[in-house]
Image (cartoon, grey):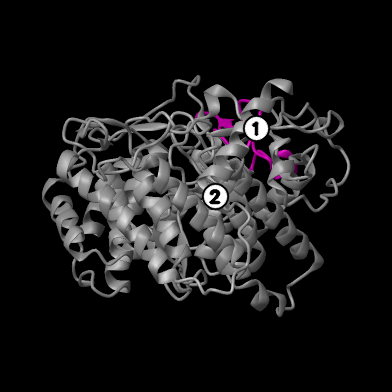
Amino acid sequence: MPSQRPVRLFALLCIAALGWSFWPRSTAAPVDWDERRGEVKNAFLQSWTAYSAYAWGNDKFHPIAKTGSQMSPKGLGWIIVDSLDTLMIMNLTTELADARRWVARKLDYNQEQDVNTFETTIRMLGGLLSAHYLAGALPGTSSRRDNVYLTKAIDLADRLLGAYDSPSGVPYASIYLSSRKGIPSHDGGASSTAETTTLQIEMKYLSNLTGNEIYWRKAENVMRVVDGNRAKDGLLPIFIDPQSGRFTTSEIRLGSRGDSYYGRFRDHKIMQGQYLVKQYLHTAEQEPIYQDMWQEALEGIEKHLLIPTKKSKLTFVAELPYGIGGQLSPKMDHLVCFLPGTIALGATGGRTEAEARKLPTWTNKKEREMHIARELMKTCYGMYAVTATGLAPEITWFHATEKSLQPNSGPARPLPRSSDSVKDWLEDYEIRPLDAHNLQRPETVESLFLMWRITQDPIYREWGWTIFRAFQEHTRLLDGEGFTSLQDVRQVPPPRRDNMESFWLAETLKYLYLLFSPDDLLPLTEVVFNTEAHVLPVLRQTQFTTGWQRTPR
């Protein structure tokens, strides 16, 4: 498109001027990863110190105005609870003591406040449960006898159970915390399919801790109801009716409103599939039903959604706004960048690729999955590499041939190896003005962390370092008091939004810190990360089981 050429030229000039090495060259000088990890820790401390000084106890932080705001009259602990396990992982004991004191004395969920069921589960319940687990698993945190986090988690979970009191058992989109009454969404009462299928590992872990099966049973029933719809090729439409338990639309996407079933959710945006893999790994690979569901979904993604770009043959994940059989849309949310790491995690079970290849279960299919993971990882990194700031937009549109965007009724399309040239990439990425903002999202660095741990390819660490440098350069305030999201990644200097999302502390910086850490810190065969990057243990022994079987396909 001719109108895009000045933008692309400007991006290339800015990349050269700023010295970003988007395709890092090998060097003889060894990298001090401990030093780089220390820089990430310092970025967290700068963010946390600014929040503590200007917005302590508030759910939102506006670092430019140096103020905070609440989501409820008393606050919900949105930032503090979301950050507990990052404080533990980074061994910030003084800051953790302040946060724990606030949780013990101030956190009160007995408020008649409506909250999103999904977000409250992954951020607040997940954050409390992760803190409880890590308090006994990491040195320098607290004693196993300190149950303040578990007590708060049980109280919150009991309130959230009201959301599941629908005729089908599919939870309502929101819940009043005090009265424990579920609230149908404004989308005609429908719930997000991905939200409802991304509540399970938190509830299951709580049942395992307490011996109370109600959390496990309520969450597991949702999976049974959703799977009973027998979605074609494992690809779930984005909305489901809590009354009937049936899908209410044919639209399929892994980004906004569709990623957590395969992956994530932000600001009422979701990704499908990640929790299928994580539920399988969370129960120590003892529930093959979830492996089966993941394989079906991944085959559906390969067949219907994976498309090569026109110039550089990068693989991207398209959308099906009219369902299977309809024209594809060449739009990919940054949210979908959870997928390469999830695919690699599913292929290896969290083992290194070298270890997984030695197992009798390794197949040519797993080889293809790892190829897809690598190609998608490159595409997600490219979202950063093609912009003037070195930071990704919220949404990217890709240039693809008309033929490739036609519906596919045959086998999965062949995926050629893509170009490594950023110049070629610039021909394939399009960033539209309304999509150009950056909220400091974690999905790409999450996948980089998983890809590094699994493949041991240092390129993923280098890409992560390049992205972190861009965050430092463009999102840190000039006075050093915090980091903020951006309005337009195409401009240098970029216009800024006055907001620091809690997932900047809970996820983005946590994954970068772990990316630069030794691999024995939270090994992937021992823990799972929920959608908000909260750390929960693999359950090698539990008294509870799935308790249902899939209907024949």
Seen in the picture, residue 459 relative to 518 is either above or below; the reply is above
* Frontmost residue, 84 versus 50: 50
Residue at screen point 42% across, 72% down? 521
| Residue 259 location, quadrant | top right
Mark 2 is surrounded, within 10 Å at the Cα level, by few (under 14), some (14 to 19) or many (20 or more) other residues, namely some
Residue 337 painted magenta: no
- The N terminus: image quadrant: top right
Task: Report x, y in % for residue 116.
Answer: 37, 34
Residue 176, given in percent of the width and then of the height, sits at 29, 31
Q: Which residue: 33% across, 53% down?
A: 43
Residue located farthest toward the left when viewing the structure as drawn? 105
Give the SS element for disc 1: helix
The x, y position of residue 115, in whole percent, is: 33, 33
Pick whichever, 232 or 93, lies toward us: 93
Q: Which portion, as a residue range, is magenta?
A: 228-256
Residue at 23 percent of width and 69 percent of height: 141
Whether residue 7 is visible to the viewer of this picture, yes or no, is yes
Residue for badge 2: 20
* Residue pictured at 87% horizontal, 46% vertical: 411
Is 185 on the left or on the right of 444, as rendered? left
Side of 178 relative to 90 (left or right): left
Figure check: 181 above or below 419: above
339 sits to left or right of 487: right
57 relative position to 206: left or right:
left
Sequence-wise, which precedes: disc 2 or disc 1? 1
Q: Which residue is mark 1?
A: 8
